[in-house]
């Protein structure tokens, strides 16, 4: 059974930081594009950041939504089969349920929900002004 478990969410004041973690079982994340999505009440789910290992360069490829560039950093630790999202300079508009997701192969751009087959249950992030 494939399982993705997120942690690290919580409540924080504007300007603060949080680090989200996603621990994956049953498959190796090095073979997948791993992504973070978020969904705020009354809004559509949107891709935040994605990461995958590049077979051609040997380096990780990352893509970010314009709204989080310069503030969020996605990374992964293959030995622990874990992906992270470091969130700095948080804003009230970052408030949402954050989901970890996975799809086979490499990332080629910011994640699109229909392409991701595996999902975690989400972790809530609330940013107060």
Image: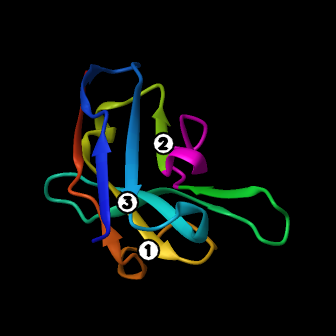
Q: Residues within 10 Å of mark 1 (few under 14, many from 20)?
A: some
Query: Which of the two labelled residues, at mark 2 and mark 1, occupies the earlier sequence position?
Result: 2
Say whether residue 7 is magenta: no
Q: Which residues are magenta?
A: 65-81
> SS class of the residue under badge 2?
strand
Where residue 84 is drawn, which disc sits there? 2
Name the spot of residue 65 as percent of width and height, x first. Answer: 51, 55
Which quarter of the rendered picture does the C terminus lie within? top left
Task: Give the residue at mark 1.
Answer: 112
- Residue at 33 percent across and 40 percent down: it is 94
Which quarter of the rendered picture does the N terminus lie within? bottom left
Q: Residues within 10 Å of mark 3 (few under 14, many from 20)?
A: some
6 with respect to 21 (left or right): left
Query: Which of the two labelled residues, at mark 3 and mark 2, occupies the earlier sequence position?
Result: 3
Q: CA distance from mark 1 to mark 3?
A: 22 Å
The nearer-to-camera label among 1 and 3 is: 3
């Amino acid at each position: 059974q494939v399982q993705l478990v997120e942690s690290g969410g919580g409540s924080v004041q504007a300007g603060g930081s949080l680090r989200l973690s996603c621990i994956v079982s049953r498959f190796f994340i090095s073979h997948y594009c791993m992504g973070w999505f978020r969904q705020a009440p009354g809004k559509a789910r949107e891709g935040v950041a994605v990461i995958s290992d590049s077979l051609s360069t040997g380096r990780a490829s990352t893509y970010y939504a314009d709204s989080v560039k310069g503030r969020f950093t996605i990374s992964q630790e293959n030995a622990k089969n874990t992906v992270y999202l470091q969130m700095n300079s948080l804003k009230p508009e970052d408030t949402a349920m954050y989901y970890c997701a996975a799809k086979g192969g490499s990332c080629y751009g910011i994640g699109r929900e229909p392409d991701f087959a595996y999902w975690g249950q989400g972790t809530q992030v609330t940013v107060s002004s």
